Amino acid sequence: MESRAESNSRIVRIAASLFFFLCVPMSIWETGYVHAKVFVLQDPAATATNLTANEFIFRVSIISHIIGNVIFILMVMLFLKVFSPVDKHLSRLVVIPLAAQLAIVFALEILNYAAVMTLKSDARATFDVAQQQEAAYFLLRLARLGVGADKIIFGLCLIPFGMLVYKSGFAPRVIGIFMIVGGVGYLIDTTLYVVLQRADYLTIQTLKLYSSACYSLSFLWFLIKGVRDEKNNAPAYLI
């Protein structure tokens, strides 16, 4: 018969697998390939040409982004199945940003879809070609800016999640600290993104890189190790 620790370890490994084998590849494909292939900063005509030439994969990326966020929420809920008994209040603080994030993602993808429709003259048939290109570029730019600002939601989810891990004893405390650091990093990044908004800000990747590395290492630990047996939980554990 499967023990409680074995059951919990299986659940968190499934959750971590969703992150590494679905969420991460989908995110890289959407932002690293599709949007890089379509969007040309400060060039509405080139962006419109790229979008028209790659319309199908762009439409697929809209669905992929929504599905990816649903999978991410499922991943977090699986983790909470194990960690929520530690602190019900912290668990609620993890869930609330997730609901907001899904709503934001839907809104951002409506902007992307509207950009496609604008270029196809479905939204405003009275626009000439240049106006359609400018309008489509504006909608895509809004969506990209929204994705940047949306990182604050991710940060607000990671911080209480990291606190749960830290308090639980199911993992070394440093794993919870990594999650908290990653969440704080995303909050700082979003603040800089909003306060210091400029055309080249999207090229600054250092803070995002360190933040992503912190929480990714945490999920990697759960993928490999699972969780500790409750009998052996010791708050002072470190690796």
Image (cartoon, rainbow, N blue to C red):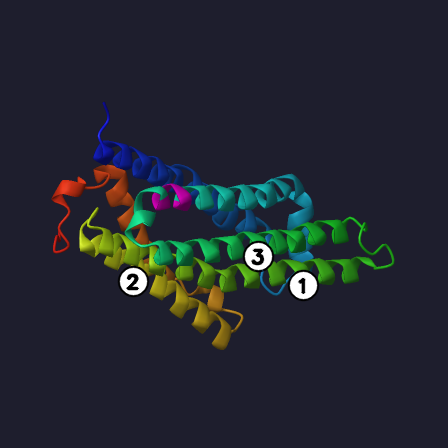
Instruction: Tell which tag, 1 or 3, sits nearer the viewer.
Output: 3
The residue that mark 3 highlights is: 104
User: What residue is disc 2 on?
Assistant: 181
Nearer to the camera, 189 or 128 = 189
Q: CA distance from mark 3 to mark 2?
A: 24 Å
Q: Which mark is residue 91?
A: none
Give how far apart the Cα atoms at labels 1 and 3 are: 18 Å
Residue 207 appears anywhere in the view: no
Q: Residue furthest top?
A: 1
Residue 223, picture quadrant: top left
Q: Residue at x 29, y 33 (%)?
A: 10
Q: Earlier in the sequence, mark 2 or mark 1?
A: 1
Disc 3 element: helix
Is tag 1's residue or tag 3's residue first in the polypeptide sequence?
A: 3
Q: Position of residue 197 (x, y in %)?
A: 51, 74
**Which region of the structure is painted magenta?**
76-80
The answer to whether residue 138 is seen in the rendering is yes
The residue at the point 61 percent across, 65 percent down is: 42
Label 3 packing within 10 angstroms: few (<14), some (14-19), many (20+)? some
Q: Nearer the viewer, residue 81 or 126?
A: 81
Q: Nearer the viewer, residue 102 or 199?
A: 102
| Image: 173 above or below 202 | above
